[in-house]
Image (tube, helix red, strand yellow):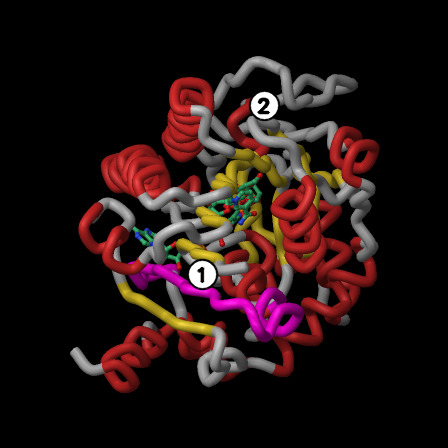
Amino acid sequence: MAIFVTGGAGFIGSQFVRDWVRLHPDQPLINFDKLTYAGNLDNLAEVAASASYRFVRGDICDAEAVAAAMPDGCDAVVHFAAESHVDRSILSAAEFVTTNVLGTQVMLDVARAKGVKRFLHISTDEVGGSIEPELWFAEDSPLAPSSPYAASKAAAEHLVRAAAHTFGMDAVITRTSNNYGPYQFPEKLIPLALANALENRPIPVYGDGMQVRDWIHVADNCAALRKVIESGKPGETYHIGGLHPVPNLELLRRLLAVLGKSDSLLTHVKDRLGHDRRYAVDCSKIQRELGWHPTISLDEGLRATVAWYSDNDAWVRRARSGEYRQYYERVYGA
Ligand code: NAD
Ligand code: DAU
């Protein structure tokens, strides 16, 4: 099996690549990534020298570059590459539309021309918008994205479904809830809170902090993605959740308790514009049909994540200072 991954230098993509190369050392894997601010080759140090792994720097909006890197008839494309941070999309949406919408169409076109056997599109529970208490977002619920990021991801999903319907492509969509774990860029809530707490700096809590997110450890998510690649049905959408919905304030208190730090670091700040109150994916379908279940409890996952960030302060420092961006030039040349 040959596999083509986009966005494999990011947080989830790099976990997926590290796991895949470890589990399938004989299967060629190409990691195609533009290395935006979110792409960090430090995340891939443990697979960089593997014979089956190849990194190609390129932009998913550049059809020629994608076509040059993608082998004919490759078994699967796993499309992670995206602009992923909601706050950035509120400041400026253009890059989100370009990468997440146009880039996805380019990936679909090239994959079809190359005879790719399966296209896995990585989407998000945010495409369903804020979910009222007691309700759940199911695979067939209507899409109601609220942020520019979520709207661009919803648009991308429509393009994937259109390609499957019109051209009979074997395309599968996954929608995952909030991932956490090692190598997450310290702009997202958990790594930001950890990095600040480790330096005894205030942790910004948007609004009242009662927004609910369902947290899944990134390794559990990647196990679900492998299941979908192996046995998901063509044209289907699968929800992946951690079964750990908690309000942000409770999550942060639990994190600080693991760190042995005081809640006084929590500092309420102005709320995010249009802040979604609650995400709640119903992930019973993947459990029922593919037999996948999350295996890492929130307490266990938070303890492991705290330990990783505490032990990897050099990674956090390089991520925060921008030093990691010199890696490519040093290793691959200009
Ligand atoms: P990330 O921001 O950490 O990484 C994104 C990666 O994509 C980076 O390596 C970046 O360099 C690359 N990239 C961006 N634009 C590109 C382009 N034009 N061409 C090639 N590469 C490009 O993102 P993440 O948190 O790992 O998320 C990965 C995917 O999963 C995204 O599609 C995101 O929407 C989705 N998702 C994320 C979460 C989460 O909690 N982080 C949850 C659900 C879904
Ligand atoms: O739900 C899946 C989504 O989860 C993914 O599609 C996105 O790519 C990913 O970024 C994430 O989006 P969120 O907006 O939920 O994640 P973020 O870590 O930015 O914020 C989590 C919650 O914490 C959210 O309610 C906003 C709040 N928050 C965030 C930050 C960065 C704070 O209170 N303070 C902060 O400093």
Amino acid found under the numbered disc labelled 2: Ser
Q: Position of residue 55 (x, y in %)?
A: 37, 70
Query: Which residue: 46% across, 85% down?
Result: 49
Q: Would you identify the image quadrant in which residue 16 lies?
A: bottom right
Q: Is residue 292 above or below residue 165?
A: below
Say whether residue 134 is left or right of residue 128: right
Label 1: which residue? Answer: 8
Assign the N terminus to one quadrant of the image: bottom right
Disc on the earlier residue, 1 or 2: 1
Badge 2: residue crowd in 10 Å (few <14, some 14–19, many ≥20): many
Q: Is residue 26 magenta?
A: yes
Q: Is residue 142 above or below residue 58?
A: above
Query: Which residue: 25% across, 38% down?
Result: 98
Determine whether the beta carbon of the residue marked 1 sits less than 8 angstroms from the nearest atom of ligand 1: yes
Determine the secondary structure under disc 2: loop
- Closest to the observer: 80 or 131? 80
- Figure label count: 2
Amino acid found under the numbered disc labelled 1: Gly
Determine the secondary structure under disc 1: loop
Tag nearer the camera, 1 or 2:
1
Residues shaded magenta: 19-38
Label 2: which residue? Answer: 130
- Closest to the observer: 297 or 57? 57
- Closest to the observer: 84 or 319? 84
